[in-house]
Amino acid sequence: MVRCFLIHTVCPVNALGAGESRVLYCRVFGPDESLFTDQEREFSPEERRVLQREQTAVVARQVHSAASLSRGAAGRLLMEALPGEEALALQEADSGVLRLRAGDPFPEEMSALWLGVQSLGFTLVCEPHENLLLAEGTLRTLTRHCLEHLHLLGPGSEVLLRSDRIDALLSRLLPHGQLLFLNHRFAHSLEKEVAAYMTK
């Protein structure tokens, strides 16, 4: 099961210090209980939200660090994509998998799959036994739809203002955090449904 999906920054932003990342969108799936220790389960709802925000910020910082390391090792410079070049930007995206040890930041061990497209990071946090190839395919599909239909790479794009569309996309491609095995026909019909919704 997927525990959460994040969209965050993976390159320096003027308002942030070096090595920091800003979480732009977060969706948590499944029972919240699994993300907290026994002691944390007794927290008030507001304290839980703050703790959950801190946990996702830790994941975003770790992915930011991994993406920076990957780009530095490859010797790639960040080139801004023009509107309409989303598919090319996705092909050139950095990607990776992180193992999140138990207690850092979640009580249980998790895996984080990430894609670094330009200045944005797209991350799925999964349970360790999850099919990582299926999760990567789902992450690439989600990222492609976000980039193509929501124009997240364009100037002045506001992820926060488009959260309802991202929620709708997640409900179709990742219902309740469950990864879907898709045959070609079902994937094609799902693509048409998502495209129809996104053009509204």
Image: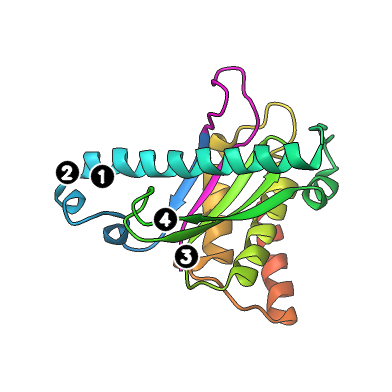
- At a point 54% along the width and 32% down the height, the residue shown is 21
Q: Is 190 on the left-hand or right-hand side of 61?
A: right
In the rendered image, residue 37 lying in the magenta stretch gets the answer no
Query: In the displayed structure, does residue 167 sit left or right of residue 191?
Result: left
Say whether marks 4 and 1 touch (CB < 8 Å).
Answer: no
The answer for how far apart the CA atoms under marks 3 and 1 are is 20 Å
Is label 2 in contact with label 1 (beta carbons under 8 Å)?
yes
- Mark nearest the camera among 4 and 2 is 4
> Please, what is the three-letter code of the amino acid marked with disc 2?
Ser
Report the magenta residues as a range: 1-22
Which mark is drawn over residue 177?
Answer: 3
The tag on residue 48 is 1
**13 or 31, nearer to the observer:** 13
Please tell me whether mark 4 sits on a helix, a strand or a loop.
loop
Spatial CA distance of label 4 from label 1 is 20 Å
Q: In the image, residue 1 lies at what x, y percent?
A: 46, 69
Instruction: Point out the tag, 3 or 1, that comes first from the N-terminus.
Output: 1
Rate crowding at label 1 as few (under 14), some (14 to 19) or many (20 or more) other CA atoms within 10 Å. some
